[in-house]
């Protein structure tokens, strides 16, 4: 018996297991698998490809049906209801208030999105350099497009040995080489680095874990598209341009979120915070008034100065139209209105709308959105949001 017991004792390096479990989100992994599958099927005959797509949709629908609980949502457990409120707040638990119930069948989820904040912050030196050199819009966009082409080449290179060469002979590449120093922080956020090559060339290659690069690339592609769009809307690149929505500094990240509902497997609540257009939060019963709560990591206190909402890829009738955002300084025991919007519409898919918070200054460690209406409740019963970004006045602590 003693020998059997000794054999069953296996050292557990739990901290290593935990880091692997949160290295990416479900939605990002699903997108990567989708892209790999599409690449492998590109030479398949159209008729066979149609059958494969039909089979994939059928399997996805079956999986979704099996994952969604068949229990009556009206009697789903809302979580711990016992214990002193102050004690529960001290344990960083979500608590209800008298005005708004926190009854939810969803688990509390951790946002794995620090890389998104690092990428947004890393555009700051790039934009400052463009303004400092008084670049016109076309020149700035040309430079960003050159960087985007470099990243596309990296994306298409082997996963573990990503590398691409920048040729100083090419006009677009030469312009980027001249502007390389301001891009150093952005390369670091993508887990990339630059190295001197032969005959004046520059190599961009992996700096550490290739998985981090794979997770970050979709985010930076979409951030570049947004930046190019916002530069096009600017009159001129001047010091006055160094503000919203061109600069997106101090994005709050790595918090815990709880939603009133979600759609498994790809419409979970953390999909609203992963920084990509490939995912979204879907609330199946959103037209009746639903909510999402964000609790700041480590109970850090932040003053919210702005937030962004992005429309998802489809179904504009499910876009949020009326909402209230509130802050709490005691972990969710009491709430104070920070901003409220009515009759908001998103004109296009993937459109980002920035809202500055102009209410009285308040430090909060939790934020709550209450979505009161969707664009067309007669057409849909769902609320869906492409992304939510919260911005603090002061820098956010990053690991």
Image (spheres, rainbow, N blue to C red):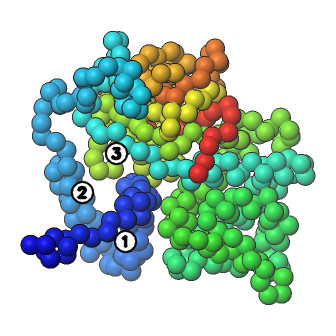
For image coordinates 36% across by 24% down, the residue present is 87
Question: Which percent across, then down, holds residue 171?
Answer: 82, 72
For image coordinates 64% across by 48% down, the residue present is 120
Q: Residues within 10 Å of mark 1 (few under 14, many from 20)?
A: few
Instruction: Tell which residue pokes out farthest to the front in this image.
Output: 2
Checking the image for residue 91, the label placed there is: none
Earlier in the chain: of badge 2 and badge 3, it is 2
Question: Which percent across, then down, holds residue 350?
Answer: 52, 44
What kind of element bears circle 2?
helix
Query: Which residue does the numbered mark 2 point to in the structure image?
Result: 60
Earlier in the chain: of badge 3 and badge 1, it is 1
Query: Which residue does the numbered mark 3 point to in the structure image?
Result: 267
Instruction: Tell which residue pokes out farthest to the right in this image.
Output: 133
Earlier in the chain: of badge 2 and badge 1, it is 1
Checking the image for residue 37, the label placed there is: 1
Task: Give the spatial CA distance, label 3 vs label 1.
Answer: 21 Å
What is the total number of numbered labels drawn onto the structure image?
3
Q: Residues within 10 Å of mark 2 (few under 14, many from 20)?
A: few
For image coordinates 16% across by 51% down, the residue present is 66
For image coordinates 20% across by 55% down, the residue present is 63
Q: Residues within 10 Å of mark 3 (few under 14, many from 20)?
A: many
């Amino acid at each position: 018996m003693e020998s059997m017991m000794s054999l069953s004792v296996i050292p557990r390096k739990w901290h290593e297991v935990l880091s692997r479990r949160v290295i990416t989100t479900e939605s990002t992994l699903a997108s990567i698998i989708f892209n790999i599958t599409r690449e492998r099927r590109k030479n398949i005959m159209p008729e066979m490809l149609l059958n494969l797509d039909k089979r994939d949709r059928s399997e996805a629908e079956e999986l979704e049906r099996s994952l969604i609980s068949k229990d009556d949502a009206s009697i789903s457990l809302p979580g711990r209801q016992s214990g002193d409120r102050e004690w529960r707040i001290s344990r960083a638990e979500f608590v209800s208030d008298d005005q708004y119930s926190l009854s939810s069948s969803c688990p509390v989820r951790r946002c794995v999105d620090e890389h998104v904040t690092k990428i947004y912050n890393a555009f700051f030196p790039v934009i400052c350099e463009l303004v400092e050199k008084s670049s016109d819009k076309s020149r700035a966009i040309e430079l960003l497009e050159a960087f985007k082409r470099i990243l596309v080449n990296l994306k298409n290179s082997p996963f573990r040995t990503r590398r691409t060469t920048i040729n100083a002979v090419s006009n677009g590449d030469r312009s980027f080489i001249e502007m390389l120093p301001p891009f150093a922080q952005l390369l670091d956020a993508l887990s990339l680095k630059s190295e001197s090559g032969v005959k004046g060339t520059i190599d961009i290659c992996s700096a550490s874990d290739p998985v981090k690069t794979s997770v970050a690339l979709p985010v930076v592609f979409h951030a570049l598209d947004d930046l190019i769009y916002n530069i096009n809307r600017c009159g001129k690149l001047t010091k006055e341009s160094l503000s919203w929505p061109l600069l997106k500094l101090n994005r709050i990240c790595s918090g815990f979120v709880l939603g009133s509902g979600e759609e498994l497997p790809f419409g979970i609540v953390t999909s609203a915070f992963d920084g990509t257009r490939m995912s979204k939060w879907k609330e199946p019963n959103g037209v009746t008034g639903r909510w999402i709560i964000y609790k700041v990591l480590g109970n850090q206190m932040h003053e919210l100065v702005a937030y962004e909402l992005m429309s998802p890829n489809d179904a504009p009738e499910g876009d949020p139209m009326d909402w209230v955002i509130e802050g709490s300084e005691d972990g969710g025991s009491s709430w104070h209105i920070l901003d409220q919007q009515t009759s908001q519409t998103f004109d296009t898919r993937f459109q980002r709308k920035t809202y500055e918070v102009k209410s009285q200054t308040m430090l909060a460690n939790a934020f709550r959105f209450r979505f009161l209406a969707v664009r067309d409740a007669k057409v849909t019963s769902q609320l869906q949001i492409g992304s939510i970004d919260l911005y603090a006045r002061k820098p956010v602590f990053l690991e």
